[in-house]
Image: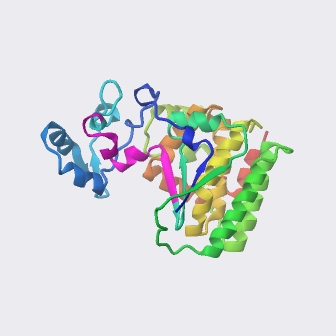
């Protein structure tokens, strides 16, 4: 198996109880099957405590019932995990062990990154000044069975490099780069599959009024938001590169290239509209990328909302 990670990936380290916004607060955590099987081998107080907070969500998933203020029931007063302390981090739920990492699997290749949803990860990515690059290593893990179209996969690999070239073309403004990126995505989309943009009547800022609210601070940012000028600061390159890395290649599964690039463009618009700092990106990511309900809605709006049509985005980008 080939493992690809951004250059900055190895520099991430959880700061646990010193984190300004604990990942153990605000959202429910699924209890995966492997962890549940292990918990059945336990006894004593920790087993009783685990059993007492397991429940089912509306989708039938086994979850840990949140305590007051949407805190994980194992998050103690020092903002440390009692389960981790009692049985070791390797036996906490898969979601907890992985966060804020994500994995995209493509048969013999796995791409792994870190998400803006973690404040520390957000700071790391926000501070990058060099072009986004990947490290590769090979391990003994066998390739995963898949039905990926090999021709489309390599088409997208080549296209992604060209997308990075556009993002890091410092001879033109960031706004100009985003316009070029949208036009490039349209060309790619036309070569793969028809894409019909919608005319759903919703304002640009209502796109960010997520039905499932995790942190009220985000709602205040949206309320006070206004369309601002996109700067040429390096952090906008990093934001754009993050979205291209995380989502672009997943078009191999649904042939929806344009929506993936729209995400990158809108990602750069987020700090321009709501606050030009890594904290703003952290709040957006935690609210959207880590809420299945909000993310499903967002993906639909990328195609259905008139304000997120390619030409409408180009107007918004160049407005100032």
Closest to the observer, 107 or 177: 107
User: In which quadrant of the rendered image does the C terminus lie?
Assistant: top right
- State the scheme by which the image is colored: rainbow
Q: Is residue 320 left or right of residue 214?
A: right
* Residue 250 % position (x, y): 57, 62
Q: Residue at x 68, y 49 (%)?
A: 133
Closest to the observer, 272 or 113: 113
Q: Is residue 91 left or right of residue 156?
A: left
* Residue 301 % position (x, y): 57, 56
Relative to 261, residue 147 above or below:
below
23 part of magenta stretch: no
Residue 309 visible to an observer of this rendering: yes
101 part of magenta stretch: yes
Relative to 26, residue 154 above or below:
below
Q: Residue at x 62, y 39 (%)?
A: 125
Residue 263 visible to an observer of this rendering: no
Relative to 166, residue 126 above or below:
above
Q: Is residue 232 left or right of residue 110?
A: right
Closest to the observer, 259 or 221: 259
Question: Which residues make up the magenta segment?
Answer: 85-104
- Work out which residue is located at the far front of the displayed protein and give it: 140
Q: Residue at x 30, y 28 (%)?
A: 76
* Residue 251 % position (x, y): 60, 65
Residue 156 location, quadrant: bottom right
Residue 181 location, quadrant: bottom right
Q: Residue at x 86, y 44 (%)?
A: 171
* Residue 105 % position (x, y): 51, 62
- Work out which residue is located at the far right of the displayed protein and give it: 171
Q: How many marks?
A: 0
Q: Is residue 83 left or right of residue 280?
A: left
């Amino acid at each position: 198996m080939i493992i690809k990670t951004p250059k900055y990936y190895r520099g991430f380290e959880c700061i646990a109880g010193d984190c300004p916004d604990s990942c153990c607060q605000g959202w429910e955590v699924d209890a995966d099957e492997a962890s549940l099987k292990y918990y059945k081998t336990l006894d004593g107080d920790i087993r009783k405590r685990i059993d007492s907070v397991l429940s089912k969500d509306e989708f039938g998933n086994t979850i840990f019932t949140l305590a007051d203020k949407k805190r994980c029931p194992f998050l103690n007063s020092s903002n440390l995990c009692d389960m981790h302390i009692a049985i070791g981090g390797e036996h906490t739920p898969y979601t907890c062990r992985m966060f804020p990492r994500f994995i995209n699997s493509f048969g013999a290749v796995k791409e792994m990154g870190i998400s803006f949803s973690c404040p520390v990860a957000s700071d790391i990515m926000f501070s990058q000044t060099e072009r986004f690059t990947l490290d590769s290593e090979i391990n003994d893990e066998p390739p995963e069975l898949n039905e990926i179209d090999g021709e489309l996969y390599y088409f997208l690999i080549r296209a992604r490099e060209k997308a990075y070239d556009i993002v890091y073309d410092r001879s033109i403004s960031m706004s100009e780069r985003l316009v070029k990126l949208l036009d490039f995505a349209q060309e790619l989309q036309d070569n793969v599959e028809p894409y019909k943009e919608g005319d759903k009547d919703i304002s640009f800022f209502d796109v960010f009024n997520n039905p499932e609210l995790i942190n009220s601070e985000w709602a205040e940012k949206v309320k006070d938001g206004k369309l601002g000028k996109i700067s040429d600061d390096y952090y906008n390159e990093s934001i754009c590169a993050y979205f291209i890395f995380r989502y672009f290649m997943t078009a191999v599964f649904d042939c929806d290239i344009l929506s993936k690039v729209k995400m990158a463009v809108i990602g750069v618009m987020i700090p321009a509209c709501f606050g030009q700092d890594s904290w703003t990106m952290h709040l957006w990511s935690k609210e959207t990328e880590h809420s299945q309900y909000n993310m499903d809605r967002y993906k639909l709006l990328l195609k259905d909302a008139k304000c997120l049509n390619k030409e409408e985005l180009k107007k918004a980008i160049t407005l100032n």
